[in-house]
């Protein structure tokens, strides 16, 4: 498993979490390691523009797109998930990886609490293998903005 190092602030936390479950992550900024990986994790915090600039400057954009399109296991964490979409509205329009159709939209002026940090229940609206065995109404911890 390769954790992509492009300067993201939560890189070491993500790698430690993976190591905690005995998965032995390799932290790498080498595009060749992405191609050879059995699984890839893209961490991230901060702004889409910085994320994409850092990925581009390290030559990681196309290798990531190719890897994800191959269908092999991939996990985007925080900004690493947001970067999968066509573009982000955060700080102005920022083109992203474009491997998932859609837009990361700014909340704008709402009554939503931002950032959202704390325990909340989650209600399932349909079945999915990811939630199999987890009853609806369980508490999950959220940290996002």
Image: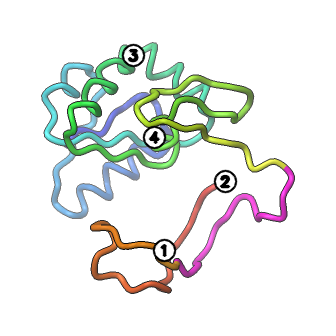
Give the Cα distance between marks 2 and 4.
Answer: 14 Å
When the figure is inspected, residue 130 is found, relative to residue 56, above or below; the finding is below
Decide if residue 84 is on the left or right side of residue 104: left
Badge 3 local density, few (<14 within 10 Å), some, or many (20+)?
some
Numbered label tally = 4
- Are dots 2 and 4 in contact, CB under 8 Å? no
Badge 4 local density, few (<14 within 10 Å), some, or many (20+)?
many
Q: Disc 1 marks which residue?
A: 125
Dot label at residue 58: 3
Give the Cα distance between marks 1 and 2.
Answer: 23 Å
Give the Cα distance between marks 3 and 1.
Answer: 40 Å
Q: Magenta span covers which residues?
A: 109-122
When the figure is inspected, residue 119 is found, relative to residue 77, above or below; the finding is below
Q: Is residue 121 magenta?
A: yes
Residue 130: % across, % down: 31, 66
Q: Nearer the viewer, mark 4 or mark 1?
A: 1
Badge 1 local density, few (<14 within 10 Å), some, or many (20+)?
few
SS label for mark 3: loop
Dot label at residue 145: 2
SS label for mark 2: loop
Residue 15: % across, % down: 31, 49
Q: Earlier in the sequence, mark 3 or mark 2?
A: 3
When the figure is inspected, residue 42 is found, relative to residue 143, above or below; the finding is above
Instruction: Give me the residue at 81% from left, 48% from top.
Output: 108
Q: Disc 4 marks which residue?
A: 80
Quadrant position of residue 20: bottom left
């Amino acid at each position: 498993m390769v954790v992509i190092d492009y300067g993201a602030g939560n890189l070491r936390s993500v790698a430690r979490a993976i190591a905690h479950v005995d998965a032995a992550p390799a932290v790498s900024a080498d595009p060749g390691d992405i191609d050879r990986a059995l699984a890839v994790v893209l961490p991230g915090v901060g702004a889409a523009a910085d994320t994409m600039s850092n990925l581009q400057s390290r030559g990681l954009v196309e290798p990531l797109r190719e890897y994800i399109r191959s269908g092999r296991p991939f996990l985007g964490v925080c900004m690493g998930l947001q970067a999968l979409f066509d573009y982000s509205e955060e700080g102005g329009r920022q083109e992203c990886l474009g491997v998932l159709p859609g837009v990361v939209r700014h909340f704008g002026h709402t009554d939503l609490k931002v950032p959202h940090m704390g325990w909340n229940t989650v209600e399932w609206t349909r079945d999915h293998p990811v939630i199999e065995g987890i009853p609806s109404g369980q508490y999950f911890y959220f940290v996002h903005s």
